[in-house]
Each structure stands twice: as structure tokens, then as C-alpha cells.
Amino acid sequence: MVAAVADVDALLGLAAELAREAGRLLLAEAPDRADDVATKSSRTDMVTAVDVASEALIVGAIERERPDDGVLGEEGSNREGTTGVRWIIDPLDGTTNYLYGFPMFAVSIAAEVDGQVEAGAVFHPSLDELFTARRGKGARCNGEPINVSGHDDLSTALVGTGFAYDADMRRRQGRWLEHVLPSVRDIRRGGAAALDLCWVACGRLDGFYEAGLAPWDFAAGDLIAREAGAETSDFDGGPVRSGSVLAASPRIASALRALVAEAATS
């Protein structure tokens, strides 16, 4: 089953509306951001009451509007649906940034139809920027079309990355960075993969790579980057997948992919 055009428009509209609403919640709760902090997979993998509240807001609205859809959320929402539609939700991408008052955090919501991400919205509350995309229809920021940088020289490219929570994996990623950094203009580590992908989409970064990501980290951002003209893949050139995400302006994508793959195997 493939959703009709009007259905996908409705899915994107709902994703955008809920991303903004959850983003407003994050800003409203910011003065109490350090309250009720717990950890998940490691001491550095934090979750707050506002992560949970944001996901509850989004999932609750989806249950009211589309009760038969499936849901996959970072904070535990996981149910099968009967419509072919599944919502992939990161209610607060960049929790550590949020806790420290570092203004790089976002809400990310993707709508998947029969296994294909058809619509996505990423809202950056600190800058009041809403990134959206529909498959085959381009990407936008606050309603205006966006495009990748078009940069064609890896040696002068600005590249984003991130690090996993597992200490051993972080150590390996640090070694990768030693290999990548001399071959590019510079590296940026924003701490919110959904935003990094959107920043590739609008040209603030020329490329991005990260290992250790989960579907909610990249589902919406990957679509937005692709619809803005980025080439996206895993480190081996296949489709983006959990644990292996790369996005770049097309003229440097192959070179960046080769560099990252070489770093990961060195």
C-alpha cells in the first residue's frame, strides 16, 4: 500500500505541528532542565523527565489523530499499527546539550509508510527553525526551499560528526577523527545528529558522518538531507542504516565515504 499524495501531506503537517509543539514544551521546561535526570545505556547517556514528557505529548496526539498507526520512540513508545504508517520519534535529540543549556537540541519526527520514510520534520527551538521534507518534493526550512552547499573539495569541507555513548566505541571514534581531520577543512561536533543532517541540507555543513545512531536519530534528518540534494549512505555506500550514517554534498560524498571507511578499518 502506498499512501495517497494528500495523505502524505497530512502526515507531514502533523509531524511539523507536533515537532513545534514539543519544541515549545522543551523551551518552557528549560529552567528546570536538570530535574529528574537518569541514565540509560551508559553514564553519559542521559534521559530527563522532559524527554519523557515530550514523547508523551507527541505520541498522545498521534493516538488521538491516527490511533491505528505504529510508533517507534526513543523513550520506549513502541507499537505495531495496521495502517502501514509508522511514526519514528526523537522527542529530544541532544539531551546533554539541553541539560547544559547548549542551544543545539531538537525534536525529530518522521512518518514511514510501508517501510519507506515519506515525510519528516525536525524543529530547532533555540533558533525557531523548522526543517521539513516530503519524499520527492524537496526540503524546506520555515517554508523556504533549502539546498546543500554544492562544495566540491573535501580538503576545504566543513564536516560534522558525533560520538557514541559506549566508552570503547568513543575511543575508536577518536582514532577515526585523527585520520579524518587532516583531510578536511575542520570538524564540528554539535551533539544532535538530526540537526547535523539538517545543517548539511541547508549548507551549514558540507558533510556529516556518525556511527552508533538509532533510527530516531536520523530518520527525519536523512530524508531532509536527501531532499535538499545531499547524497546519503552508510559507510560502505549502501542505504543509511542504524550505526552507519553519512550525508554530504554530492561532489564530496564519495571522497568523504572513502575517508571514513578507511578510518574505520585502520
Image: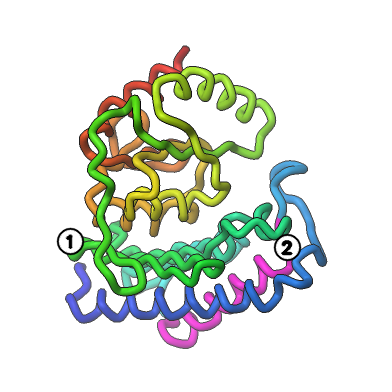
Determine whether the residue tagged by mark 1 lies in a helix, strand or loop: loop
Task: Give the residue at mark 1.
Answer: 136
3D distance between C-alphas at marks 2 and 1: 36 Å
Q: Quadrant of the N terminus?
A: bottom left
**Residue 95 in the figure: left or right of residue 122:** right
Q: What residue is shown at x 35% (from left), y 35% (from top)?
A: 234
Q: Position of residue 53 (x, y in %)?
A: 66, 74
Determine whether the residue tagged by mark 2 lies in a helix, strand or loop: strand
**Residue 238 in the figure: left or right of residue 171:** left
Q: Name the magenta segment's main secondary structure.
A: helix
Q: Position of residue 13 (x, y in %)?
A: 34, 79
- The amino acid at mark 2 is Thr
Q: How many marks?
A: 2
Q: Position of residue 224 (x, y in %)?
A: 32, 57
N-terminal of the pair, mark 2 or mark 1, is 2
Q: What residue is shown at x 41% (from left), y 29% (from top)?
A: 185
Is residue 53 highlighted in magenta?
yes
Crowd tier of the residue under label 1, counting other residues whose Cα lies within 10 Å: few below 14, some 14–19, many 20 or above: few
Q: What residue is shown at x 65% (from left), y 56% (from top)?
A: 102
Please determine whether, in this image, residue 97 is positioned above or below residue 54: above
Q: What residue is shown at x 61% (from left), y 28% (from top)?
A: 169
Q: Residue furthest right?
A: 35
Q: Which label belongs to residue 48?
A: 2
Quarter of the rendering containing residue 247: top left
Question: Range of the magenta residues?
Answer: 47-67
